[in-house]
Image (cartoon, rainbow, N blue to C red):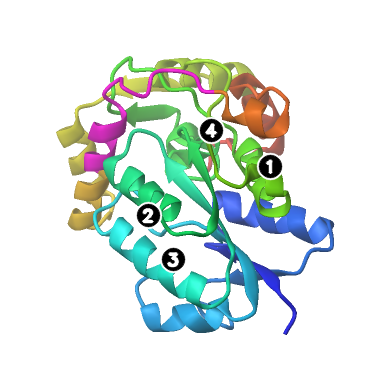
Amino acid sequence: MTQELLVLTPKGKTGRRVISQLQARNINVRASSRTSTPRFDWGAPTTWEEALAGVRAVYVVYFPDIAFPGAAKDIAAFTEIAIGSGVRRLVMLSGRGEKEAQHCEQVLQDSGADWTIVRAAWFSQNFSEGFLLDSVREGVIAMPGGDTPDPFVDVDDVADVVVAALTDDKHIGRLYEVTGPRMLSFADTAKEISAATGREIRHVPVTLDEYRASAVAHGIPVDFADLLTGLFAETLDGHNAYLADGVQEALGREPRDFADYAKATALTGAWDPRD
């Protein structure tokens, strides 16, 4: 059987970019999700072994989020099955300053596999491909965290690091903490997007309780809203307010700046107001 690279959560922000890059290199890629064949579902461990058959390396993206309770247990079970199926290389997307994510990282480091961890800051693309897109279109970004800054990282940079780790042995055993080149608060990101779009985008600070109530009012299930606000409380308290050099270490170049991301995204029309 031809050995393949397996990409989990292939329709996600990083997954689809990783697949595109690997295919451009004529590398055999298997994209497995709950609707693929073979099927892969984090909530159904019986699907894991078939998805791993004939695979030599996996890009591990946990759904719904590696910071959520129970992720480490699933990662441990998955890693055991993957190694038992003959997988040697595991490249995992992780998050900065998240206790559950750190437990997942330790599982990988102790597994005996050839591992690489890509520990990412908040994605810039959350504003254009994620939960903040509608907020930008409406002109108001209501988020908790106050003036706490974060070094937002471009997803294209994350994907570049992942592809390098999947295809080059020199990245085995490395933990790359990837961030953008400067610190930005949500108010700063609103200013950058305003400059790029030519219209006013405002940041409105809200409390965690206010954010949770708004999320529920917009149809987010209560349990998931609780997990989100818990994640925000964990990551927006200031302890992640520092730059890291994972992009430089892995790729030998500087990461993309948020302003460049905003200008390029504005040109696509993604942030144009909707009727």
Mark 3 or mark 4, which has the lower sequence index?
3
For badge 4, the amino acid type reads Ser
Gap between marks 2 and 4, in whole Å? 28 Å
Gap between marks 3 and 4, in whole Å? 29 Å
- Residue occupying image coordinates x 19% and y 56%: 223
Q: Position of residue 106 (x, y in %)?
A: 37, 48
Residues at badges 4 and 1 in contact (C-beta under 8 Å)?
Answer: no
Mark 4 or mark 1, which has the lower sequence index?
4
- Residue 268's disc is none
User: Disc 2 designates what residue?
Assistant: 107
Q: Of residues 246 and 29, which is closer to you in this image?
A: 246
- Residue occupying image coordinates x 64% and y 56%: 16
What range is drawn magenta here?
A: 229-244
Q: Secondary structure at mark 3?
A: helix
- Residue 79's disc is 3
Q: Of residues 270 and 101, which is closer to you in this image?
A: 101
User: Disc 1 designates what residue?
Assistant: 160
For badge 3, the amino acid type reads Thr
